[in-house]
Image (cartoon, rainbow, N blue to C red):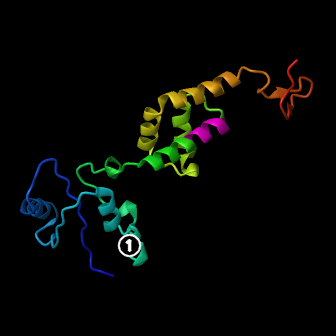
Amino acid sequence: YKKAHYHVIYIARNPVTIESVRNKIKRKLGNSSVSHIEIIDYVKGAYEYLTHESKSAKEKNKHVYDKKDIIHINDFDLDRYVTLDESQKRELRNILTEMIDKNGITNVKELRAFVSWRGNEYGINNMNDVNDVLASNGNYFKMAFDGNYQNGFRPQYARRVNSDTGEIIEGVAKTE
């Protein structure tokens, strides 16, 4: 094990010098807190590297830090810096469509509640990604919701109940 140390990601809105970053970190964490500074352009990758969740850290069998032990200061939120590529967006759209179809979801509010409740079962753990996919595919999801809503009123698709026993009759009912 290495002695206790800090991993810091400092994000600046304006251009700054390495020395000004070094001084700010020292003021926050102490004079001996800084030994190495790098300029990066991929926050998510740097975060995974520093927490030992990156592919290279896993290959080296480095200890992965427990997320609950990581201190985020100044309202740092990694999700602000994570974006999905087009294939990931398409995959998420397909997963959401499957949820809608299998669970008879008829509107965005129901979908968001379902994702909050059971999204982890489908590998969804970021509502921001869901919102982005919904916003960029509005007409597509409107058609999916409308289809479920309309099918709820069509007898050929609705479940049939035996009026004598109250049991659900399996299969699709024939229309006359």
User: Residue at image x 54%, y 31%?
Assistant: 141
User: Residue at image x 53%, y 31%?
Assistant: 140
Q: Residue furthest bottom?
A: 1
Range of the magenta residues? 96-103
Around disc 1, counting alpha carbons within 10 Å, would you say few (fewer than 14), some (14 to 19), or many (20 or more)?
Answer: few
Q: Which of 167/154 is in front? A: 154
> Which amino acid, mark 1?
Ser
Q: Would you say residue 113 sits in the magenta stretch?
A: no
User: Where in the figure is residue 94, as x and y percent of width and height?
Assistant: 56, 43
Q: Quadrant of residue 135?
A: top left
Image quarter hosting the N terminus: bottom left
Q: Which of 149/23 is in front? A: 149
Q: Would you say residue 97 sits in the magenta stretch?
A: yes
Q: Residue furthest top?
A: 176
Most prominent secondary structure in the magenta stretch?
Answer: helix
User: Where in the figure is residue 171, as x and y percent of width and height?
Assistant: 85, 34
Quick check: 6 above or below 76?
Answer: below
Q: Residue furthest right?
A: 164
User: Where in the figure is residue 68, as x and y percent of width and height?
Assistant: 38, 60
Q: Which of 73/53 is in front? A: 53
Could you tell me which secondary element the residue under label 1 belongs to? helix
Q: Quadrant of residue 26?
A: bottom left
Residue pointed to by mark 1: 56
In this image, 92 relative to 163: left or right? left
In this image, 2 relative to 113: left or right? left
